[in-house]
Image (tube, rainbow, N blue to C red):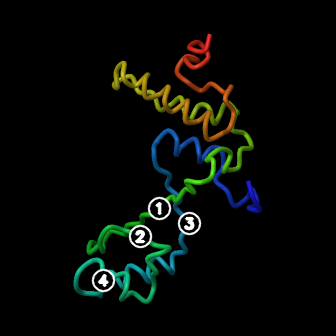
Amino acid sequence: MGSVEREHLLTASQMAHFVTDGFLMLERLVPPALNEAVYADERSLEGAGYQFWHQSEAVHHGIWHCAQPNRTERTRYVFKLRLRPGQVQRGLFNTEGYDSEEVGAIIRRGYQRWQGNEARLDHVQRARLWRYVTGDDSIDVSFEGALTRMAR
């Protein structure tokens, strides 16, 4: 995996939430002082939105991103998850506990009865994605063990 220490990687629980929900909220990732400085620049700078990245003293477009300046009173944060397309995307998080019941429950909770039959298909795809990102082709967190049954 490289030289990154496990404590600096996403946990298995966080990765399971990402696989299930398609996004991940990291509330305390950016220090409040930086958030406030960017917000102050956002409120004070005039002109086209793309100019914000060149005019702001508090932010650099390579580490902070949003579509346009937020001119509301509500703070907004958006980060990009950049994957290295030339690297196999398996096991690139702290995989400790990836096969625990607690982490499996995160993936399984993605099934909602109101979604109807299509939800089962979506759930199987999430379970396949979980197999892929964990690097464990035998783990089955699919609805009622569908991946194991289909392999027989």
Q: Which residue occupies 71% across, 44% down?
A: 95
* Residue 8 in picture, x, y percent from top left: 69, 61
Disc 2 from disc 1: Cα separation = 7 Å
Residue 100 against residue 81 in the figure, above or below: above
Residue pointed to by mark 3: 29
* Residue 87 in picture, x, y percent from top left: 62, 52
- Mark 2 and mark 3 in contact (Cβ < 8 Å)? no
Residue 3 against residue 143 in the figure, above or below: below
Residue pointed to by mark 2: 65
- Mark 1 and mark 2 in contact (Cβ < 8 Å)? yes
Q: Which residue occupies 39% across, 22% down?
A: 113
- Mark 4 and mark 1 in contact (Cβ < 8 Å)? no
- Mark 2 and mark 4 in contact (Cβ < 8 Å)? no
Query: Nearer the N terminus, badge 4 or badge 3?
Result: 3
Q: As shown in the figure, which amino acid type bears the numbered disc 3? A: Leu
Residue pointed to by mark 4: 51
Disc 4 from disc 2: Cα separation = 13 Å
Query: Nearer the N terminus, badge 2 or badge 1?
Result: 2
* Residue 17 in picture, x, y percent from top left: 54, 43
Q: As shown in the figure, which amino acid type bears the numbered disc 4? A: Gln
Identify the secondary structure beneath mark 4. helix
Residue pointed to by mark 1: 80
Residue 40 against residue 77 in the figure, above or below: below
Residue 135 falls in image quadrant: top right
Q: Quadrant of the C terminus?
A: top right
Disc 1 from disc 4: Cα separation = 20 Å
Query: Nearer the N terminus, badge 3 or badge 2?
Result: 3
Q: Which residue occupies 38% across, 79% down?
A: 39
Residue 145 falls in image quadrant: top right
Identify the secondary structure beneath mark 3. loop
Residue 131 falls in image quadrant: top right
